[in-house]
Image: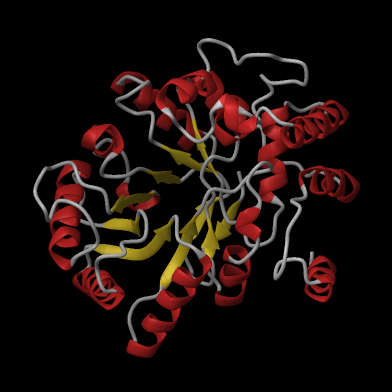
């Protein structure tokens, strides 16, 4: 596996990041250890979790595994924003909640520092200055090495960049957005901000909850009963069958299956490889419930789609946009840079 710099920082991470959201939920601690061992043996050094994954159990599992490893060889990322308690200050990005959150994450991870500490989503109730100054203090104390954001909108990310620059605070090193062949609205504003400001992009849900895994083809009437998409329907998650059973999805999947057959790779590997070649992307986050799933996803690394294959997938997944995102001059200029 190759390594890439995280945005304009000097931090090098593997071009695929291992997501730990399944740890302690669908995946047992023993199997989670095996998955992390497999990932590291394949050259991976970048693992992403969050304080709320499995109500803290994901961090604990990563922490117990981490005790057996050379800590400085790994890049461990986690997040803060959503709470697990019932108190009024157990949620959000206030100074109080961030300080309590980082201390709890350090304890669960069993480490002296967190390589990448990310705010999990925007907090409309807390002044951004309070959030960013607190994150800056964590870096100054040595508890955190780099900071990042997840699930921000374009104006929110740019505002954070500008405020940090004005005050001399630690800037965001990365953004963790949803980004994949079926979720390309990220390209409207977020990707340009990241490219212009030197912020690395580590996309979550590169397979859109299983839709790009190869399990789905035109003509299907229902998702497999044991699939995440079926669970999404029951739980109201965004990747539900009702949200994606439409002509746009089937057009994208038609192109994905065709290109995958040409390359001799799986549709999942092809979808992740497409993402690896997109502008601004540092490391897609691949999750896995089993070693077999991880091994398959890691097959997205080490090869490249041709320019013609990229163009076909681009065209099939192109979104119909309206003003101001349909400005032809800007579209042509960006296309010329790719």
Residue 91 left/right relative to 50: left
Give above or below for 233 relative to 8. above
Q: How many marks?
A: 0
On screen, residue 120 versus residue 192, left or right, reads left
Q: Position of residue 235 (x, y in %)?
A: 40, 25
The one nearer the camera, 30 or 236, is: 236
Residue that extends furthest to the left in the rendered view of this protein: 87
Q: Is residue 216 above or below residue 324?
A: above
Pick the quarter of the image with the N terminus: top right
Q: Is residue 29 left or right of residue 247?
A: left
Where on the picture, by quarter, is residue 299? top right
- Using the image, determine if residue 79 lies above or below residue 251: below
- Taking the spot 69% from the left edge, 21% from the top edge, the residue there is 216
Colour approach in the figure:
secondary structure
* Residue lying at the far top of the rendered structure: 225
Does any portion of residue 161 appear in the rendered image? Answer: yes
Q: Position of residue 239 (x, y in %)?
A: 54, 32
Residue at left offset 65%, top offset 63%: 188
Residue at 20%, 52% (x, y): give it.
91
Q: Quadrant of residue 67?
A: top left
- Taking depth in this image into account, of 241 and 84 the one nearest to the observer is 241
Spot occupied by residue 242 in the image (x, y as percentages of width and height)? 59, 27
Left or right, 271 with reference to 93: right
**Which residue of the protein is positioned furthest toward the right in this rendering?**
308
Q: Position of residue 295 (x, y in %)?
A: 57, 26
For the point 14% across and 46% down, which residue is it? 107
Asked if one can make out residue 301 in the rendered structure from this viewpoint, the answer is: no
202 lies above or below 169: above
Image quadrant where one finds the C terminus = bottom right
């Amino acid at each position: 596996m190759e390594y890439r710099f995280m945005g304009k920082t000097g931090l090098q991470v593997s071009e695929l990041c291992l997501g730990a959201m399944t740890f302690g939920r669908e995946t047992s601690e023993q199997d989670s250890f095996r998955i992390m061992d497999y990932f590291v043996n394949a050259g991976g050094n970048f693992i992403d979790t969050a304080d709320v994954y499995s109500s803290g159990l994901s961090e604990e599992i990563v922490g117990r595994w981490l005790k057996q490893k050379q800590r400085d060889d790994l890049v461990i990322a986690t997040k803060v924003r959503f709470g697990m308690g019932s108190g009024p200050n157990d949620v959000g990005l206030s100074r109080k909640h961030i300080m309590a959150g980082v201390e709890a994450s350090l304890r669960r991870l069993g480490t002296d520092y967190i390589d990448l500490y990310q705010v999990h989503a925007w907090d409309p109730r807390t002044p951004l200055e309070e959030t960013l100054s607190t994150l800056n203090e964590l870096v100054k104390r040595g508890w955190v090495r780099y900071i990042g954001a997840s699930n921000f909108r374009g104006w929110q990310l740019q505002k954070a960049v500008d405020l940090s620059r004005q005050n001399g605070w630690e800037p965001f090193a990365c953004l963790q957005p949803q980004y994949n062949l079926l979720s390309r609205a990220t390209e409207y504003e977020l990707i340009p901000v990241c490219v212009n400001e030197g912020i690395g992009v580590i996309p979550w849900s590169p397979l859109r909850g299983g839709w790009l895994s190869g399990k789905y083809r035109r003509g299907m009437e229902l998702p497999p009963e044991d699939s995440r998409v079926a669970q999404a329907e029951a739980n109201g998650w965004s990747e539900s069958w009702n949200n994606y059973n439409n002509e746009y999805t089937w057009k994208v999947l038609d192109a994905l299956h065709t290109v995958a057959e040409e390359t001799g790779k799986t549709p999942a590997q092809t979808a992740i490889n497409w993402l690896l070649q997109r502008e601004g992307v540092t490391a897609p986050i691949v999750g896995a419930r089993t070693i077999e799933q991880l091994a398959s996803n890691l097959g997205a690394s080490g090869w490249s789609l041709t320019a013609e294959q990229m163009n076909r997938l681009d065209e099939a997944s192109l979104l119909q946009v309206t003003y101001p995102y349909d400005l032809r001059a800007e579209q042509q200029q960006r296309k010329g840079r790719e």
